[in-house]
């Protein structure tokens, strides 16, 4: 039998690892990225049976000085200590509505904590229990890449016609870019309104960083065609697009996606319909266009929760979103006779969101209770100025 491992020796290949490859391999770090950051301090052991009691004691000691936010995708062990739960923008607004809280402990991911810092007062300190809790989607658009994209649009003669619309799931740098260039932020709930506003300002939209939300909103909700959309790939020269393609496009979609919602497929939909006759398929708009087209209902995290609250007893649902939330909803509505299952057979948690666990939360609360400031998220004033401008444009949408 041929030894395939020696057929093409690795040492003969003239391949230099890219900065991104080194980052993913853990052999390099990017201080502006949401990856590659170690959590300082000694964490409690995850097997410590006193973790729950320790978290309660530290939170009680802090009292009104601390306000804990829990994103819907967090583990149950963390959610139990949240003062409020919700999606990223709801939580950021909730934090801004609590100016008396000195510490905002954001159990979510990095871009969410940045948004909270932008919207809260200078006296408040936003804390992320694990600095390595990032977002793969937000990482797919860096400030340098987006600046280069704008240069490409300028050279193609279309930049003056383009209004950027950035998803809430983006870094503060990208939000600031959006603010500087006359654009707005959107959530999965108000993406249609944001796009309608943008097309009143210009002829084209640069949608960052989630291609699927942009495509689904444009085609499904606004009646555009798939041909109206082009995909800008930051890893290709000129985004992989010609000047003519950019001139003809209405939606310039950034090549980014959610690693969780991108897993769902039409096969997942067909399979669950065969396994559970009469099932209602409900998916998040971050899913691929063909999955959204095959589903019965499409909506944001808050929409999903409200749809299940209003669903009749005995109804059956397959949900295409993060597993922690689906499992929590299944347990919540089981007493009402509602059958709720995960759309895909493969278990899929948001790996970066799940970095926030009970040991990290305990370490954070105990440190704050002892007067030690840890893992504070601070957006610089210049970035905050323009990111806030973009957020305020969204808040002003009718």
Image (cartoon, rainbow, N blue to C red):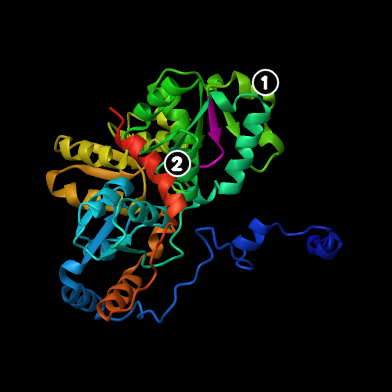
Check residue 14 in the rendering and tell me which mark sits there, or answer none.
none
| Label 2 close to label 1 by CB (< 8 Å) | no
CA gap, disc 2 and disc 1: 33 Å
- Position above or below: 75 against 174: below
Q: Nearer the viewer, mark 2 or mark 1?
A: 1
Q: Position of residue 98 (x, y in %)?
A: 20, 56
Residue range corresponding to the magenta coloring? 251-257
Q: Is residue 266 visible?
A: no
Q: What residue is rendered at 80% in x and 60% in y?
A: 4
Task: Judge the density around disc 2: few (<14), some (14-19), many (≥20) Cα neighbours within 10 Å.
Answer: many
* Residue 304 seen: yes
Say which quadrant the C terminus sits in: top left
The residue closer to the viewer here, 381 or 277, is 381
Q: Which mark is residue 264?
A: 2
Instruction: Check the picture and name the quadrant holding the N terminus.
Output: bottom right
Question: Disc 1 designates what residue?
Answer: 244
- Camera-nearest residue between 350 and 171: 171
How far across and how far down the image is residue 176, in percent? 47, 45
For label 1, count other residues whose C-alpha is less than 10 Å away and answer few (under 14), some (14-19) or many (20+).
few
What is the x, y in percent for residue 120?
A: 29, 54
> In the rendered structure, does residue 160 fall within the stretch colored magenta?
no
Q: Is residue 336 left or right of residue 318?
A: left
Q: Earlier in the sequence, mark 2 or mark 1?
A: 1
């Amino acid at each position: 039998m041929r030894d395939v491992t020696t057929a093409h020796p690795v040492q003969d290949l003239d391949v230099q690892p890219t900065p991104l490859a080194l980052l993913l391999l853990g052999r390099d770090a990017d201080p502006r990225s949401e990856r590659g950051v170690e959590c300082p301090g000694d964490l409690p052991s995850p097997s410590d049976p006193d973790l729950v009691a320790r978290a309660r004691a530290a939170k009680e000691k802090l009292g009104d000085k601390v306000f804990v936010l829990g994103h819907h995708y967090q583990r149950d062990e963390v959610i139990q200590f949240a003062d409020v739960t919700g999606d990223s923008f709801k939580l950021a607004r909730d934090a801004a509505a609590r100016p008396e809280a000195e510490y905002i402990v954001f159990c979510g991911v990095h871009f969410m904590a940045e948004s909270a810092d932008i919207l809260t007062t200078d006296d408040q300190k936003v804390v992320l229990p694990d600095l390595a809790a990032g977002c793969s989607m937000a990482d797919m658009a860096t400030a340098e890449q987006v600046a280069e994209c704008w240069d490409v649009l300028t050279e193609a003669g279309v930049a003056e016609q383009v209004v950027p619309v950035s998803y809430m799931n983006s870094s503060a740098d990208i939000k600031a870019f959006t603010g500087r260039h006359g654009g707005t932020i959107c959530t999965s709930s108000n993406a249609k309104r944001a796009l309608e506003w943008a097309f009143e300002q210009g002829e084209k939209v640069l949608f960052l960083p989630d291609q699927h939300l942009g495509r689904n909103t444009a085609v499904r909700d606004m009646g555009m065609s798939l041909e109206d959309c082009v995909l800008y790939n930051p890893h290709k020269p000129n985004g992989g697009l010609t000047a003519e393609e950019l001139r003809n496009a209405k939606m310039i979609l950034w090549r980014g996606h959610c690693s969780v919602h991108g897993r769902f497929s039409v096969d997942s939909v067909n399979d669950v319909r065969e396994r559970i006759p009469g099932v209602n398929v409900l998916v998040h708009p971050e899913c691929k266009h063909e999955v959204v087209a095959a589903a019965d209902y499409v909506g944001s995290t808050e929409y999903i929760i409200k749809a299940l609250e209003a669903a009749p007893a005995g109804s059956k649902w397959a949900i295409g979103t993060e597993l922690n939330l689906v499992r929590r909803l299944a347990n919540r509505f089981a007493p009402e006779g509602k059958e709720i299952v995960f759309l895909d057979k493969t278990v899929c948690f948001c790996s970066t969101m799940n970095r926030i666990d009970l040991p990290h939360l305990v370490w954070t609360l105990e440190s704050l209770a002892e007067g030690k400031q840890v893992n504070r998220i601070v957006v610089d004033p210049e970035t905050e100025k323009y990111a806030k401008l973009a957020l305020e444009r969204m808040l002003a949408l009718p």
